[in-house]
Image (tube, rainbow, N blue to C red):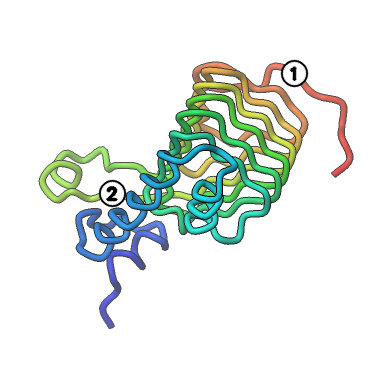
């Protein structure tokens, strides 16, 4: 049985990003993003584009411009807010909990590239690893979240941070690389 490049991508295996099926899905996503990013927030056009891009989301607010690869691999809880210039490379599942806030220019990279030059340059191989963000999280402007990272409930990520490792519940974490700098009083979920 032959496994498709899309199945490889979603399974976290190395895959060919220029596969025809994947390329076609990215182009379809770009068409939705064009409508979203050219619409006025809260207008019917904007609401329809959000619903088409991420159908199961409850009360999302994506400030234009917003960018992603597919949209179909983004799972949003209720009341998600992304400020201007959010980028989500969703080659693997990106799961975001309830009541999550993103400052401007937050970037989530579920996509990665091999360190091996031949695989990366000559073969065009990529890989992905899921990102999970808990409930009630605030991510400050310009923060970058790398592939495979989990951010716990009620945590705050400082502006400009580069999150390369998991962040536990109920903390403030910041820096490059991001590290826990303060515990927060435990909140009830």
* Relative height, residue 152 to residue 24 (above, below): above
Dot 1 or dot 2, earlier in sequence: 2
Residue 110 percent location from the top left of the image: 44, 44
Between 129 and 109, the residue placed more toward the observer is 109
Residue extending farthest to the bottom is 1
Q: Disc number at residue 126? A: 2
Question: Residue beneath label 1, please?
Answer: 182
Question: With 139 as the anchor, is 64 left or right in this view?
Answer: left
Residue plotted at (76% across, 34% down): 154
Which type of secondary structure does the marked residue at label 2 adopt? strand
Q: What is the C-alpha distance between the residues marked 1 and 2? A: 35 Å
Residue 77: x and y in percent read: 67, 51
Q: Where is residue 25, by image quadrant? A: bottom left
Q: Residues within 10 Å of mark 1 (few under 14, many from 20)?
A: few
Residue in front for this viewpoint, 149 or 27: 27
Asked whether the beta carbons under mark 1 and mark 2 sit within 8 Å of each other, the answer is: no
Determine crowd level at label 2: few under 14, some 14-19, many 20+ residues with C-alpha closer than 10 A: many
Q: Nearer the viewer, residue 45 or 179?
A: 45
Image-based side of 123 in relation to 169, left or right: left
Identify which residue is drawn at 28% across, 71% down.
4
Residue drawn where x is 48% and y is 33% of the image: 86
Side of 80 where 178 appears, left or right: left
């Amino acid at each position: 049985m032959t496994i498709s490049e899309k199945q490889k991508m979603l399974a976290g295996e190395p895959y060919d990003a220029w596969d025809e099926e994947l390329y076609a899905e990215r182009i379809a996503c770009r068409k939705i993003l064009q409508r979203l990013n050219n619409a006025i927030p809260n207008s019917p056009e904007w609401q329809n584009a959000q619903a088409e891009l991420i159908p199961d989301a409850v009360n999302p607010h994506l400030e234009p411009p917003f960018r992603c690869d597919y949209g179909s691999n983004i799972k949003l809880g209720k009341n998600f807010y992304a400020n201007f210039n959010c980028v989500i490379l969703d080659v693997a599942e990106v799961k975001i909990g309830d009541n999550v806030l993103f400052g401007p220019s937050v970037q989530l990279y579920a996509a990665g590239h091999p360190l091996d030059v031949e695989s990366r340059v000559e073969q065009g191989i990529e890989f992905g690893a899921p990102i999970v963000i808990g409930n009630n999280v605030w991510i400050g402007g310009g923060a970058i979240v790398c592939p495979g990272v989990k951010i716990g409930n009620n945590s705050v990520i400082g502006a400009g941070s580069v999150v390369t490792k998991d962040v536990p519940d109920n903390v403030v974490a910041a820096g490059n690389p991001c590290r826990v700098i303060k515990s927060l009083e435990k909140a009830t979920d």
